[in-house]
Amino acid sequence: MFLVLMIIVSVSAAGVFVANSSSLELRSAGFVRQAGQTHYVTEAGASSALARMRGSCRAYFTDYLRRQASLSGGATTPPAELRDCPRVTSYVTPAGGGPRVATPVYLPCYTFLSRDFTTPMTFGSVFQSASGTYPRTEGSLGTGGVQPLFKVVVTELGTDVSPTRGADQNQATVTTMPTRYEFASQGITELDRASYGADVNNVARGDESLRAIAVLQCN
């Protein structure tokens, strides 16, 4: 009787271990999938911002924005247009002479959000949401309730004075110099708050960032 009891206990313990291992395996696979989705969401944000900048660069980086950045030296709080912009240290020589003074200056930048690409002027949003009940219609991230979001801060680093490959330096129609821009994209995947409520803070949330430098002809 004791031997039979020990066999039953051993088999039960093995079953519990297998069930727990299977649960961890499924959870790990879900984390890997969400990490991959977050990676592509981050890349999609950078690509969307780059495409928008190529088409209408001057609509975002105006002379007013650059003037606000140049006048931001020494400001305790940046203007509203420069709230997300990086800050660098500029060394300025006083008008009366003397040693140079270190002055923080904000670089001109523009922030793109996911919702900025869901407008009537575009061919639809960047991501498509799942819809329906059962069977659900798949969206960009499958049939689940994961919501993709991204934020891209594009910073103007300055004019690229080096010759552009393949460009004719004597061409009269070339009136603007190519400009270097930094694209800092942050991608996020989380459960849709409208469907799951405030409890989504207790579940997995994917977050990834990338930075890239692009040289654009801002026409």
Image: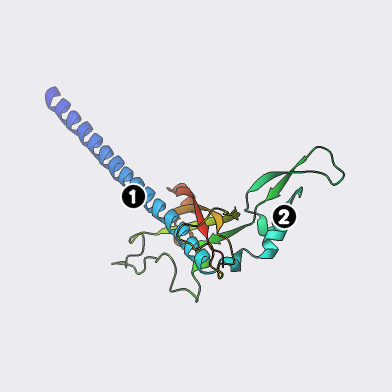
User: How many C-alpha atoms fall within 10 Å of the one at disc 1: few (<14), some, or many (≥20)?
Assistant: few
Viewer-proximal residue, 171 or 18? Answer: 171
User: How many C-alpha atoms fall within 10 Å of the one at disc 2: few (<14), some, or many (≥20)?
Assistant: few
Residue sitting at x 28%, y 38% = 20
Location of residue 92 (image quadrant): top right
Residue sitting at x 63%, y 52% = 85
Residue 192 visible in rendering = no
Q: Earlier in the sequence, mark 2 or mark 1?
A: 1
The N terminus is located in which quarter? Answer: top left
Of the numbered discs in the image, which one, if any, rests on residue 33?
Answer: 1
Give the farthest residue toward the right.
96
Side (left or right) of 81 relative to 150: right
Identify whether 88 is placed above or below 9: below
Q: Disc 2 designates what residue?
A: 70
Identify whether 62 is placed above or below 72: below
Residue 47 visible in rendering = yes
Nearest-to-viewer mark from 2 and 1: 2
Instruction: Measure the alpha-carbon separation of dots 2 and 1.
Output: 44 Å
Viewer-proximal residue, 168 or 29? Answer: 168
The kind of residue on which mark 1 rests is Arg
The kind of residue on which mark 2 rests is Ser
User: Picture coordinates of residue 34 (x, y %)?
Assistant: 37, 50
Residue sitting at x 87%, y 44% = 96
- Secondary structure at badge 2 equals helix
The C terminus is located in which quarter? Answer: bottom right
Residue sitting at x 18%, y 29% = 10
Give the farthest residue toward the front.
170
- Secondary structure at badge 1 equals helix
User: Picture coordinates of residue 84 (x, y %)?
Assistant: 62, 53
User: Picture coordinates of residue 65 (x, y %)?
Assistant: 67, 61
